[in-house]
Amino acid sequence: KWVPITLLLSFADAQPTDAEREVWEQVDVVLKDAKAVLDELQAYKGAGQEIREAIQNPNDEVLQEQAWAAVVPLVGKLKKFYQFSQRLEAALHSLLGALTSETYNDPTQHLEREQALAKQFAEILHFTLRFDELKMTNPAIQNDFSYYRRTLSRMRINNVPADGENEVNNELANRISLFYADATPMLKALSDGTTKFVSENKNLPIENTTDCLSTMASVCKVMLETPEYRSRFTSEETVSFCLRVMVGVIILYDYVHPVGAFAKSSKIDMKGCIKVLKDQPPNSVEGLLNALR
Ligand SMILES: *[C@@H]1O[C@H](CO)[C@@H](O)[C@H](O)[C@H]1NC(C)=O
């Protein structure tokens, strides 16, 4: 599949044109917070120790209080991450709207003329896969949250007022709990967002959205497999950026498209994409191959 060279080269530092600016600025505000979310998640330690001690010594009030004091601020973080997933979903919604609008009539043209938006789309996917990788390797998250819920309901029964700002009402707690129960919660949020975008835009054939995704996948694939382009990548970070974006769009495509990414009729060259992944140093892509499985 043909990919315009300017698109390949612009991935690094695309600046928004006037036509892109409104959506770009909206999304930029969200992306600016993404780094902080990743840093916080990476540093997330969990209250496993305190929880264990509290559970092992149910009659020790001091230990109960210590566990609660450790868990409440963590739940505040988990709530913040969850709320961020909703902002990200909204940002993706705006980007899909722009990248599939009738302004241009094919997805390659869209991506070529809206390179800064394409770049933001890529950044969202990159963030998403990174978030899910970190979440997957941190079992403390679900443990902390379920301890919080159990303890909270016990406190409610005993009529003890709970902490204010970090408190999570029951309905929100259910949604947060569902969010973290998923193996890849951020990707799930994006997939749901994409599905919602497709179903809200009844006049827009589903292909127009999935073509945007498959074009993104082929941009990444061509960049990674063509030595001439690849040699322009100044850091390994750019390589892993492209790899994550490629896998992210494949998964979204698979989720949204009625026959999926792995079907014969798929517009994504899955064989080619998997080959690109397998050609990387093995330890660097295991998580991504697992995500595809
Ligand atoms: C959907 O895509 C086709 C082909 O790329 C294009 O001709 C058509 O205008 C698009 N439809 C909408 C509603 O944008």
Image (tube, grey):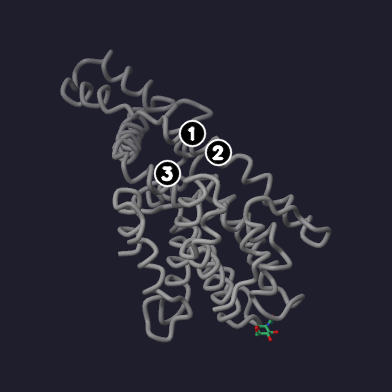
Instruction: Tell me the residue that label 2 is attached to.
Output: 35
CB within 8 Å, label 1 to label 2: yes
> What amino acid is labelled 1 in the image?
Asp
Q: Which mark is residue 185?
A: none
Quadrant location, the C terminus: bottom left
Name the residue rendered at 44%, 81% in the picture.
266
Which residue in the protein does label 1 denote?
39
Q: Nearer the viewer, residue 186 or 2?
A: 2
* Mark 2: C-beta under 8 Å from nearest atom of ligand 1: no
* Number of numbered discs overlaid on the protein picture: 3
What x and y, as percent, mark residue 254?
A: 42, 72
Q: Residue at horizontal 29%, vertical 40%?
A: 139
Which type of secondary structure does the marked residue at label 2 adopt?
Answer: helix
Residues at marks 1 and 3, CA–CA distance in whole angstroms: 23 Å
Res 173 label: 3
Q: Is residue 12 visible?
A: yes
The 10 Å Cα crowd at callout 3, few under 14, some 14 to 19, many 20 or more, is: some
Would you call the spot at circle 1 few (<14 residues within 10 Å), some (14-19), or many (20 or more)? few
Decide which of tag 2 and tag 3 comes sooner along the chain: 2
* Amino acid at pointer 3: Ala
Report x, y in % for residue 243: 45, 57
Residue 285, placed above or below residue 141: below
